[in-house]
Amino acid sequence: MKPRNDVDLRTLNTFGVTALASQLVDLEHEEQLPDIRRWLDGRTPFILGGGSNLLLTRDLTEPVIRVCLSGRSYQIDHNSGEVQVVVGAGESWHGLVTWSLEMGFQGLENLALIPGTVGAAPIQNIGAYGAELSDVFEAVRVYDLARGTWLTLGPRDCQFSYRDSIFKQPGTAHWLICSVTLRLQHHQVGNGQLKLDYGDLRAEVQANRELKGLGGLSTQSLRPQEIAEAVIAIRTRRLPDPAKLGNAGSFFSNPIIGLEEALALQARFPGLPAYRVVSNDPSGQHGPAMKLPAAWLIERAGWKGVRQGDAGVHADHALVLVNHGTASGQQIRRLAQEIQGEIHRLFGLTLAIEPRVV
Ligand SMILES: Cc1cc2nc3c(=O)[nH]c(=O)nc-3n(C[C@H](O)[C@H](O)[C@H](O)COP(=O)(O)OP(=O)(O)OC[C@H]3O[C@@H](n4cnc5c(N)ncnc54)[C@H](O)[C@@H]3O)c2cc1C
């Protein structure tokens, strides 16, 4: 275990903002954990994955652990077709999606091209194109750096909801996710479980099939790869590539409010979209919940494409804040706060920030 001093984090966060880590250690093997725990000596670490859901507004004086744990294994139940996949936390998420499709496994196709590591996926229950990690999640193995003990958490323990989990709650800062277990399905043509009903995904898949002379979707010959290809094509067209323009994907979560409040807002702002969401409240006491697209609110408030120095709102995608070059994390945070204030004034809504701001 060799901690490095004064490590420049600019290439280790997808916003590409400059910040120094006073001390940083790469975690490559689980056997290093007891040594790392001794090195921490009771201090709370900052755990770093791929830095794609992170806004650094200061130098990190706390010890940084960069998770580089690798490894993949799987077991197929040939009777049910279920596949249990165990993956090291430092593996690339998109690498896992690509590998699973090559192996003929289905379940991750809608989550293609999300940057970052496998170990960070449970933190905000990553989601895209009608799917969420929780749909295929079985367990995580966690090392508690405060106590030196191992925990295994199942889906209920993780308390997954929209872009949220137990890992965002206080008291979990010492939990280091070391591996994630997923339950996928060995793909069989025509099994009908593929998810196509989000946005323009179906149209994209259909257009690709026509181009390749594969016929319409009714042929039942759809493969998970086709969904992944369509998701990759849409995402590549819409989202800026962090290698070219610093960003952390969606900067704000879509607000979720009650039906009555949503209807009242729609009466004041005609054209405001609202989508019914499945409630986490089994008692149903709080009535139906509606999700509003934060991008619509931000665009309506006039922020799309706005630039303050090198900090800006993307010109095509109002939900994505960008670093045009040398913006600092503080400048990006200031821009985000102004947007939050304006959305609150105009619509009475609180926009929650999705990435971790440090
Ligand atoms: C262009 C772009 C598009 C994106 N699209 C999506 C999308 O469609 N859907 C979506 O949900 N997200 C999206 N994101 C956000 C991001 O990719 C995900 O949240 C991803 O899971 C973050 O992974 P990471 O390894 O980069 O995490 P980091 O940014 O390094 O860390 C994020 C948080 O997780 C914690 N953490 C990381 N690893 C561990 C670990 N092993 N144990 C404990 N804590 C850990 C960190 O301390 C931090 O709090 C996008 C980001 C970008 C840049």
Image (tube, rainbow, N blue to C red):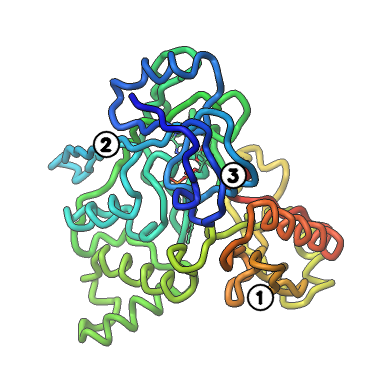
- 10 Å neighbourhood of mark 1: few (<14), some, or many (≥20)? some
Task: Name which residue lies at 77% across and 70% down.
Answer: 266
Q: Quadrant of the C terminus?
A: top right
Disc 1 target residue: 305
**Tag 1: amino acid:** Gly
Whether ligand 1 has any atom under 8 Å from the Cβ at mark 3 is answered as yes
Count of marks overlaid on the render: 3
**Are the residues at dot 2 and dot 1 in contact (C-beta closer than 8 Å)?**
no
Q: Earlier in the sequence, mark 3 or mark 1?
A: 1
**Residue 356 figure quarter:** top right
Image position of 276 (left or right of 174) = right
**Tag 2: amino acid:** Val
- Inter-mark Cα distance, 2 to 3: 26 Å
Task: Name which residue lies at 72% across and 71% down.
Answer: 303
Residue occupying the far right of the picture: 345
Q: SS class of the residue under badge 2?
A: strand
Percent position (x, y) of residue 262?
Answer: 76, 61
Disc 2 target residue: 86
Q: Earlier in the sequence, mark 2 or mark 3?
A: 2
Percent position (x, y) of residue 332?
Answer: 67, 57
